[in-house]
Image: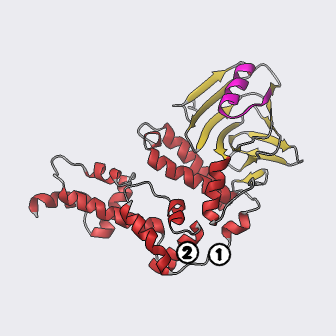
Amino acid sequence: MRQHALSRFPILGTRSLEEARDAVTRVYLEHELSSANDRLQMTLNAVSDSVMTLGYLTYQSTTTLVMPPTGDCYHVNLTTAGTTDADRSDGGRATTRAGLSGVVLSPQQRNTVHWTPDAEQLILKLSRRRLEDHLADLLGRAVAEVVDFDFSLDLTTPTGRSLFNAVEFLAAELDRPNGLAEMPLAREQLEAFVMTQLLHAGRHQFSDDLVAPAEPVRRGRLAPVLEYLENNADEPLTPQELARVGCMSVRTLHATFQQVLGESPMSYLRRIRLDHVRGELLRSDPETVRVTDVAMRWGFLHQSRFAQQYRERFGERPRDTLRLRNTG
């Protein structure tokens, strides 16, 4: 039997319509639920943190959900199997197909979604405040209104495909023992990437501003950012945080780094962290210290990629650096 996504985080498996409605209400929002027959076999798995809820849902039955405006959250339904048909109170209509399209439920619209028996979805619930603050960081100005997403979400565009892949990767990593569920700093960075990709993949009133060319600022404006990077390289830094330090938008931050330093902020940070790893390896006892532990402490989670980056920067393998302590 195929294992459902997020199986490490079961909420409920039931044939009861009432139990199914209560569980989805607890995790997502109040709604009305009806089924065309008595063959309901609902499965809900979900995991939450301060940024988002990510869940897997299937009913294995022809079902209809009627949902009031979501209020303080955005909901993103990504269909991974089967199809759904959706409409909302402003007359918008959308059909979702596995891996090709989804919908964004607005905080201000009443939504109805009809599921086919084979439909399965990964569903994101995002705090309005967190998503709108994230957008404000990207734009470099305050966002004081609801992001009015188009109802339909195209997952075949480059940004749409990136969003879908990132959410699937997040679900798989949360499911994996010793994966992102046990790495809150890495999880926070991936969730920030998911929000960025959603804001680029969905069409809304800020879309044109997000892709407008950014003008770089004077080199001197980078000084506080560079100092912050040096002093906080062991923290889970994000472009949004660095942009706030420099009092600029994320797009301006990237444009200025590229013009002044010829690389991205995260590439610059990676070089700083590699230097710290090398320094720590040179000071460590190879009998008691593992390269993997040092690398992960400095934010390098993919060991093969880390080893390649380390060798490109220093011309040797990290384990050879560790051995230098006994020979230097």
- Local secondary structure at mark 2: helix
Q: CA distance from mark 1 to mark 2?
A: 9 Å
Residue designated by label 2: 255
> Which mark identifies residue 165?
none
- Residues at circles 1 and 2 in contact by the CB criterion of under 8 Å: yes
In the image, is residue 75 above or below residue 295? above
> What is the quadrant of the N terminus in the image?
top right
In the image, is residue 77 above or below residue 268? above
In the image, is residue 132 above or below residue 221? above
Amino acid type indicated by mark 2: Ala
Q: Is residue 160 left or right of residue 181?
A: right
Residue at the (75%, 31%) spot, across then down: 30
Specify start and end residues of the magenta stretch as a single range: 18-33
Does label 1 or label 2 sit earlier along the sequence? 1
Whether the magenta-drawn stretch holds residue 252 is answered as no
The x, y position of residue 279, in whole percent, is 24, 62
- Find residue 315 and report its image quarter: bottom left
> What is the quadrant of the C terminus in the image?
bottom left
Label 2 crowd bin: few (<14), some (14–19), many (20+), radius 10 Å: many
Residue at the (64%, 52%) spot, across then down: 131
Label 1 crowd bin: few (<14), some (14–19), many (20+), radius 10 Å: few
Residue designated by label 1: 213
- Looking at this view, name the residue that lies furthest to the left: 327
Most prominent secondary structure in the magenta stretch? helix
Residue at the (77%, 35%) spot, across then down: 115
